[in-house]
Image: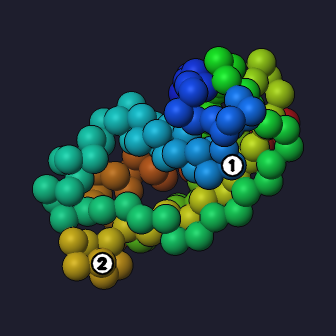
Amino acid sequence: MFEWPLRVYIEDTDAGGIVYYANYLKFMERARTEWLRQLGFEQESLRQQDCLFVVQSLQLDYQRSARLDDELSVSVALERCGRASMVIHQQVMLAGEVLCRGQVRIACVNAAGRPRSFPNPIRMALADQASQFLTSKETM
């Protein structure tokens, strides 16, 4: 499982210092981008290969609010991967406590917005990540 640390800034909160609900999506997006970067895939190089990732659907479950100055951790775990889409499980945590969890379906499309298969290097890296997720679920 990949984890990305972040701190809550004033721009992330409402007047009461509580993280605005939609910002959890931004936190998750940043973690997915850094997860791909860690796998060796930069957004710009993917775009140059006519390979873009778009959110197809998502489901979020909010448990508790984050607040100004909290040090959060956002996890990314690839649950399953097909030829042109993947399902990712994500959590936003504070000191090990889950604040928000989500399941995000990502589709691979070309610049025209049409579905396309993942390029082979990405498909191989994602297949490896999916098998690691299944192995870790079996040991839980």
Q: CA distance from mark 1 to mark 2?
A: 28 Å
Left-right relation of 118 to 100: left
| Residue, disc 1 | 21
Quarter containing the N terminus: top right
Left-right relation of 92 to 116: right
Q: Which residue does the image show at 62% across and 52% down from the upper left?
A: 22
Left-right relation of 51 to 95: left
* Mark nearer the viewer, 1 or 2: 1
Q: How many other residues sit within 10 Å of disc 1, few (<14), some (14-19) or many (≥20)?
A: some
Coordinates of residue 86 in the picture (x, y in percent): 52, 62
Using the rendered image of the protein, determine whether residue 71 is visible from the camera's viewpoint. no
Left-right relation of 56 to 124: right
| Residue, disc 2 | 113
Which quadrant holds residue 107?
bottom left
Quarter containing the C terminus: top right
Element at label 2: loop
Disc 1 marks a residue whose amino acid type is: Tyr
Image height check: is 119 above or below 62?
below
Q: How many other residues sit within 10 Å of disc 2, few (<14), some (14-19) or many (≥20)?
A: some
Coordinates of residue 77 in the picture (x, y in percent): 61, 43
Element at label 1: loop
Image height check: is 133 above or below 5?
below
Which quadrant holds residue 105?
bottom right
In the image as oriented, which residue stretches furthest toward the left? 48
Nearest the camera: 82 or 104? 104
Coordinates of residue 93 in the picture (x, y in percent): 73, 30
Nearest the camera: 67 or 87? 67
Q: Which residue does the image show at 23% across and 53% down from the upper left?
A: 46
